[in-house]
């Protein structure tokens, strides 16, 4: 194994990793992905590390597509429910929708979640730094892990802070006498924040898993996959939350 | 290393081998289809001889009839027409057709099977709870499905139904994620997108649709469960009165929910679902027609585009199930138009198949016969589609037997015939033997005649106004009594149809032991599931049939290297 390598050899490896190829490195801002999809000339790169990464990303993105539908349905239900009325015996059009002013703490939570998107993205990128990855791959210590771990931990802390904040928002609402089944608006609030919170809880579990994986997994590619997939999931949850937050705050 | 035939491998219960899972799925669907068929025969018996008393149960009461309808529809749509083409078949051949010996996520795939099995058990359990199975039909419209007081079976039975559906959605999404990833990354060297068999394209589109449609149903079912148990009112309108008793939850009256919301969500799932069940059959039809006319699929790229278009347009037509629901009439017109639009790519595929029939010499093997049957049902049922897509006509025809005729031809019979085609065709992959051809042909002809005999007259009784979901025609009102002879004919025909399936069952199990051993490529096909070696390098298109196609006869398999020119 040559101790030094030129860019040129890496470039060829990247195109055709074959069996036991080097782990993918970050040449483009997107990470390991690679946009060389060509309708007809694409040869599948079976069993290569890049192929593995793409496979897991595909799975995460499909899950996220399903999740997107999930939340889209929830949002459309919100609007339908908001606009449905009935005719009271007095011939009045009656709606049982009572606009709810959301607890202000949600603003802070949103900021926290946004921050966490940055921390996890930094962590993710550490794992695709070419020089670090090559050092690791050649068995010269684990600089990428060393650098990514603090950012992952920061993300976990921020994620927990967000969930704690959501919990406090619930407590405040309950304190004001708004419970799950008080009126249509409150159960939407609880449902939206609750299902999103459950997703985030899974995300935190994934983060913890990725953290452990970074230290335990023997293969660099598997570490990359663990962190990369978690990061995309986390980003999507951040994005979903932004939409849900706008919905809850501005579309009452 | 090719995967050896299943019979030679030790059967482990919790296997992640996709071939074994395919067999498990087929077994599960067999249980569902037998149960579903028996239920339908009970319905037919009751409609024709309402006073017939059954040994243990006694007379079928109206609510029993509705429970039969509900469970029949749910079993057939989810556990037969979805499970076989969208779970069993891809497990059987998808990986092989793309030249891989494994799926992208074998454990996810296995988990999906077990969740499906749990879902089936949950559903069947509804028969055994107090008050029995739910009665609100496979579409489970609220408010009846939201209130336990709405009728017998709407308490625990309905809960079980909802839980079963939720589980099924989860399993469907999980297994589709596996298929999508498998198609995207496990393809053999050289197997580009335009070298994929049309079955693989179909599974790509139907898996995408599954991810979208079943997620919507998942949350809809969850919201309905919340309405039933957590005091919400997504679907429950105000002022519900059942049997003179105002309905309320504790001291609180229901809010102003909207049953229409369920209709939208359900059909947003429901229409893509009909394409999920039929798209794999359409892909299979192309493959089998090419194989047994020994001609390539003409307009192969156009077929891909049509498949993709069906997938995309299929997401925007759900409102044609709701013309008479009180939806905005302008929306009805719009959905009518999108529905006509989607019949364009469907017709394009049908015309291509017809062209294939006239260009080649047909080899009338059993799989080919069943594909022709599929084609005939798809056309016969498809012709009534554009009629129903006119809001004005549908106002009369909705909820009559005309609808029952439409979807039993276009979805149920077309779907089942393509399932049979697939089983006869791929049986050598399962067992290393072929199914008996003579029995297969007898099975086909009786089934074809009996299926038309069963479902075609329903158009007539539907046009006469016979409503759907009614337990009997005779009664204090005489208006439908003249339809009773038609009803009787349908019932006899249905029994013949069911009896013909005994031939199939016999053939299925008998051939596993005694069938003629199959050669490695018994149908002289070109696609990779028949390849003797895994990981071939592919240089050719999927359907290279015809005299000029190859050195080894009139075809050029995808696993053989490029022909020298
Ligand atoms: C030419 C294409 C088609 C058109 C224009 C069409 C149109 C329609 C319309 C308008 C309805 C609603 C009628 C009503 O409920 O009043 C309907 C019902 C139905 N269609 Fe189709 N259809 C087409 C193809 C298909 C296909 C390919 C399938 C299945 C594979 C299918 C399965 C069904 C089912 C299951 C229902 C009844 C659902 C229920 O109410 O329980 N249709 N179709
Ligand atoms: Cu439809």
Image (cartoon, rainbow, N blue to C red):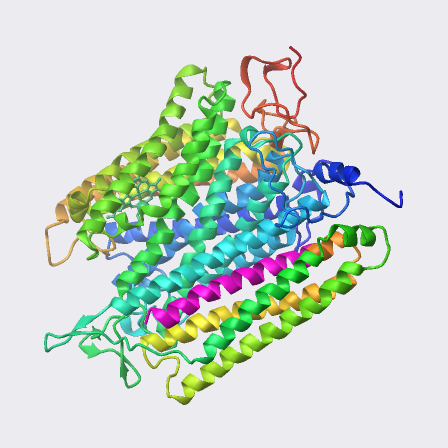
Residue B444 or B292: which is nearer the viewer?
B292
Q: Quadrant of the N terminus of chain A?
A: top right
Residue shown at 49% from the left, 83% from the top: A168
Residue B333 position within the rendered picture, expressed as x and y whole percent measured from the top left: 20, 46
Q: Is residue B287 above or below residue A93?
A: above
Image-based side of A224 in relation to A40, left or right: right
Residue pictured at 43% horizontal, 35% vertical? B307
Residue B208 location, x and y as percent?
48, 46
- Compared across the picture, whether B281 is left or right of B376 comes to right
Magenta-colored segment: predominant secondary structure: helix
- Pick whichever, B50 or B222, lies toward us: B222
Residue at the spot 38% in from the left edge and 71% down from the top edge: A248
Residue A233 shown in magenta: yes
Q: Residue at x 64, y 47 (%)?
A: A28
Range shown magenta? A225-252
Residue B27 colored in magenta in the image: no
Q: Position of residue B67 (x, y in %)?
A: 33, 61
Quick check: which quadrant has ligand 1? top left
Tell me where residue B357 sits by quadrant: top left
- How many numbered circles does the render carry? 0
Q: Position of residue B361 (x, y in %)?
A: 45, 15
Residue B138 falls in image quadrant: bottom left
- Which is nearer the eye, B403 or A150? A150
Image height of B272 relative to B431, above or below = below
């Amino acid at each position: 194994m040559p101790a030094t390598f030129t860019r040129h050899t890496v470039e060829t490896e990247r195109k055709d990793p074959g069996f036991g190829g080097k782990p993918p490195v970050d040449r483009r801002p997107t990470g390991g992905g690679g946009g060389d999809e060509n309708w007809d000339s694409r040869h599948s790169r079976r069993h290569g590390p890049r192929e593995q990464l793409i496979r897991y990303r595909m799975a995460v993105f499909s899950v996220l597509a399903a999740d997107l539908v999930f939340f889209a349905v929830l949002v459309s239900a919100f609007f339908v429910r908001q606009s449905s009325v009935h005719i009271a015996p007095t011939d009045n059009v009656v709606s049982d929708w009572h606009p709810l002013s959301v607890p202000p703490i949600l603003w802070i939570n949103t900021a926290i979640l946004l921050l966490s998107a940055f921390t996890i993205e930094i962590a993710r990128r550490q794992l695709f730094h070419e020089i670090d990855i090559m050092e690791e791959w050649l068995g010269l210590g684990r600089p990428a892990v060393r650098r990514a771990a603090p950012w992952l931990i920061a993300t976990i802390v921020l994620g927990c802070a967000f969930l704690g904040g959501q919990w406090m928002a619930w407590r405040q609402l309950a304190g004001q006498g708004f419970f799950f089944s008080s009126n249509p608006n409150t159960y939407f609030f609880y449902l939206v924040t609750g299902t999103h919170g459950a997703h985030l809880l899974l995300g935190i579990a994934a983060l913890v898993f990725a953290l452990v994986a970074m230290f335990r997994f023997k293969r660099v590619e598997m570490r990359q996959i663990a962190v990369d997939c978690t990061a995309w999931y986390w980003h999507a949850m951040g994005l979903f939350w932004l939409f849900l937050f706008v919905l809850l705050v501005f579309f009452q | 290393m090719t995967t050896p035939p299943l019979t030679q491998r030790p059967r482990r219960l919790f296997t992640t081998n996709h071939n074994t899972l395919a067999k498990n799925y087929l077994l599960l669907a067999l249980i569902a289809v037998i149960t579903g068929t028996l239920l339908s025969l009970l319905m037919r018996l009751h409609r024709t001889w309402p006073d017939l008393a059954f040994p243990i149960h006694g007379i079928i009461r109206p609510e029993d009839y509705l429970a039969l309808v509900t469970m029949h529809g749910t079993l057939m749509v989810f556990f037969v027409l979805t499970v076989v083409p969208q779970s069993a078949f891809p497990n059987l051949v998808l990986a092989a057709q793309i030249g891989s010996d494994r799926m992208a996520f074998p454990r996810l795939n296995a988990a999906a099977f077990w969740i499906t099995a749990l879902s089936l058990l949950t559903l069947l359990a509804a028969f055994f709870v107090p008050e029995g199975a739910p009665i609100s039909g496979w579409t489970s419209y609220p408010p009846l499905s939201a209130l336990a007081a709405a009728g017998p079976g709407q308490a625990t039975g309905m809960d079980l139904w909802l839980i079963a559906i939720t589980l099924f959605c989860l399993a469907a999404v999980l297994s589709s994620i596996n298929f999508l990833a498998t198609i995207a990354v496990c393809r053999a060297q050289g197997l580009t997108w335009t070298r994929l068999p049309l079955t693989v394209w179909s599974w790509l589109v139907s898996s995408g649709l599954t991810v979208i449609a079943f997620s919507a149903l998942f949350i809809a079912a969850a919201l309905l469960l919340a309405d039933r148990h957590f005091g919400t009112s997504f679907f429950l309108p105000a002022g519900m009165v059942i049997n003179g008793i105002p309905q309320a939850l504790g001291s609180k009256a229901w809010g102003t929910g909207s049953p229409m919301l369920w209709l939208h969500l359900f059909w947003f799932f429901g229409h893509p679902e009909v394409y999920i069940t039929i798209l794999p059959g359409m892909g299979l039809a192309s493959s089998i027609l090419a194989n047994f006319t020994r001609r390539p699929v003409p307009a192969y790229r156009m077929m891909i585009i049509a498949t993709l278009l069906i997938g995309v347009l299929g997401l925007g037509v759900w409102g044609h199930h709701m013309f008479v629901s009180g939806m905005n009439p302008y929306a009805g017109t719009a959905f009518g138009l999108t529905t006509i639009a989607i019949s364009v790519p469907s017709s394009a595929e049908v015309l291509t198949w017809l062209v294939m029939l006239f260009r080649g010499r047909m080899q009338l093997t059993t799989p080919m016969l069943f594909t022709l049957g599929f084609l005939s049902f798809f056309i016969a049922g498809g012709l009534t589609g554009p009629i129903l897509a006119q809001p004005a006509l549908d106002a009369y025809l909705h909820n009559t037997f005309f609808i029952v005729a439409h979807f039993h031809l276009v979805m149920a019979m077309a779907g089942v015939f393509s399932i049979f085609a697939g089983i006869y065709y791929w049986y050598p992959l399962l067992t290393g033997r072929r199914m008996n051809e003579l029995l297969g042909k007898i099975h086909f002809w009786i089934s074809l005649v009996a299926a038309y005999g069963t479902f075609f007259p329903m158009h007539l009784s539907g046009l006469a106004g016979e409503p759907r979901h009614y337990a009997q025609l005779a009664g204090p009102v005489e208006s439908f009594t003249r339809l009773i002879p038609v009803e009787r004919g349908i019932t006899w025909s249905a029994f013949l149809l069911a009896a013909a399936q005994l031939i199939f069952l016999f053939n299925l199990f008998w051939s596993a032991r005694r069938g003629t051993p199959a050669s490695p490529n018994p149908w002289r096909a070109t696609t990779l599931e028949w390849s003797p070696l895994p990981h071939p390098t592919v240089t050719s298109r999927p359907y290279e049939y015809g005299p000029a196609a190859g050195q080894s006869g009139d075809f050029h398999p995808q696993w053989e290297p490029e022909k020298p020119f």
